[in-house]
Image (spheres, rainbow, N blue to C red):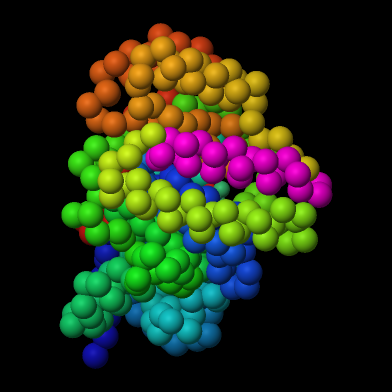
């Protein structure tokens, strides 16, 4: 007998790819494996209240609130997500849902909220599944949450667990899959990457110029596509080795190359796009100068936008934050940046 009514609540963080996912095939399957740091501070909190419908029907019934306000404009996205996951979640048409969600990061910060948002919705639904079926093993529950999150937004599948996850089958990660992300065994990761820091420079808080759906599609027929997919797999091999050995120099070389390659793919697509801003380039130059001058292990990565993720070991935190305040804040929109770090994934509240 399934419960009449109930409520679940969770947080799911964002993540930042080290080897990028760019290019997909149906349905939401990656053209190449990717690996990411799960974040900690940038996250979405979602609660889902559920109540059995009085008269069963074939509709999805839900109310959606974002930061306390009803947002009908989000409904079509949720409906298409529900349609996609219908076959895997038997109770979607049994209940009427009240979904309330909010982000820890500022609304228009240029930080994509699809990974944490879709991650939290997927994990919340699995918490309901767990109430219906308390015997569901934890590992299976996490895997299925990642699977559902992927159907919402590809990279969201990497946010359910942490601190480092891999999505896409790759011969070196024995349990990897195109269908969901898996966590790398933390015991294997070198100490230097524990508590790795990510300070996000908000260079441009505007709306994304290219949606990721459009972006992924630009890889169909892209002249460099096959080479790029092969390169991503090779980079994952080397990066994983660097994470195990604590080889930060190799880490830096791969992570920065991956960021620039992602943007190079967009610059060489038809149509083409430049998603960096002059301040993105200025900040990158400063980061390189600082590394050269001090021997710091600071590096950068980018998403499909102008903002910069500055990555560095925890032991350098004080110096790097001084450097950011003194030299990089001038390139940030309104001087804004967010101090984040590597984190553990979904939390049930
Ligand atoms: O999850 P999507 O479809 O929004 O794709 C995001 C892709 C990048 O953020 C640019 C790279 C990645 O691997 O996260």
| Position of residue 49 in the picture relative to residue 260 (left or right) | left
Rendered-image quadrant of the C terminus: bottom left
| Position of residue 29 in the picture relative to residue 337 (left or right) | right
> Which residue occupies 36% across, 14% down?
294
Magenta region, residue range: 250-271
The residue sitting at the top extreme is 326
> Which residue occupies 51% across, 36% down?
256
For the residue pair 244 and 46, the one nearer the viewer reads as 244
Task: Using the image, determine if residue 69 lies above or below residue 76.
Answer: above
> Which residue occupies 47% across, 26% down?
201
Task: Using the image, determine if residue 208 lies above or below residue 30.
Answer: above
> Which residue occupies 43% across, 30% down?
299
From the top left corner, tell me how far across and down residue 15 is, in percent: 41, 48
From the top left corner, tell me how far across and down residue 78 is, in percent: 53, 64
226 is within the stretch colored magenta: no
From the top left corner, tell me how far across and down residue 8 is, in percent: 27, 64
From the top left corner, tell me how far across and down residue 115 is, in percent: 46, 53
């Amino acid at each position: 007998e399934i419960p009449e009514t109930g409520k679940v609540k969770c947080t799911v963080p964002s993540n930042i790819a080290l080897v990028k996912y760019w290019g997909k095939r149906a349905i939401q399957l990656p053209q190449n494996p990717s690996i990411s740091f799960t974040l900690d501070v940038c996250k979405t909190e979602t609660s889902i209240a559920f109540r059995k419908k009085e008269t069963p029907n074939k509709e999805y019934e839900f109310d959606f609130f974002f930061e306390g306000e009803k947002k009908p404009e989000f409904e079509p996205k949720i409906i298409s997500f529900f349609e996609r996951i219908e076959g895997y979640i038997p109770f979607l048409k049994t209940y009427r849902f009240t979904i309330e969600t909010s982000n820890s990061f500022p609304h228009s910060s240029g930080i994509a909220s699809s990974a944490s948002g879709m991650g939290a919705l997927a994990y919340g639904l699995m918490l309901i599944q767990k109430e219906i079926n308390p015997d569901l093993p934890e590992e299976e529950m996490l895997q299925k949450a990642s699977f559902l999150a992927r159907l919402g937004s590809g990279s969201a599948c990497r946010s359910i667990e942490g601190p480092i996850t891999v999505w896409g089958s790759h011969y070196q990660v024995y349990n990897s899959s195109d269908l969901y992300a898996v966590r790398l065994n933390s015991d294997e990761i070198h100490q230097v990457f524990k508590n790795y820091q990510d300070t996000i420079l908000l260079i441009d808080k505007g709306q994304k110029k290219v949606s990721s759906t459009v972006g992924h599609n630009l890889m169909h027929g892209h002249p460099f596509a096959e080479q790029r997919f092969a390169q991503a797999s090779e980079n994952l091999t080397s990066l994983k080795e660097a994470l195990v050995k604590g080889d930060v120099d190799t880490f830096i070389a791969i992570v920065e190359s991956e960021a620039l390659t992602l943007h190079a793919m967009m610059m060489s697509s038809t149509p083409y796009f430049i998603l960096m801003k002059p301040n993105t380039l200025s900040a990158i130059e400063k980061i390189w100068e600082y590394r050269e001058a001090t021997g710091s292990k600071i590096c950068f990565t980018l998403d499909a936008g102008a903002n910069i993720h500055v990555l560095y070991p925890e032991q350098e935190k004080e110096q790097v934050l001084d450097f950011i305040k003194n030299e990089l804040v001038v390139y940030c929109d309104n001087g804004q940046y967010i101090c984040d770090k590597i984190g553990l994934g979904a939390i049930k509240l």
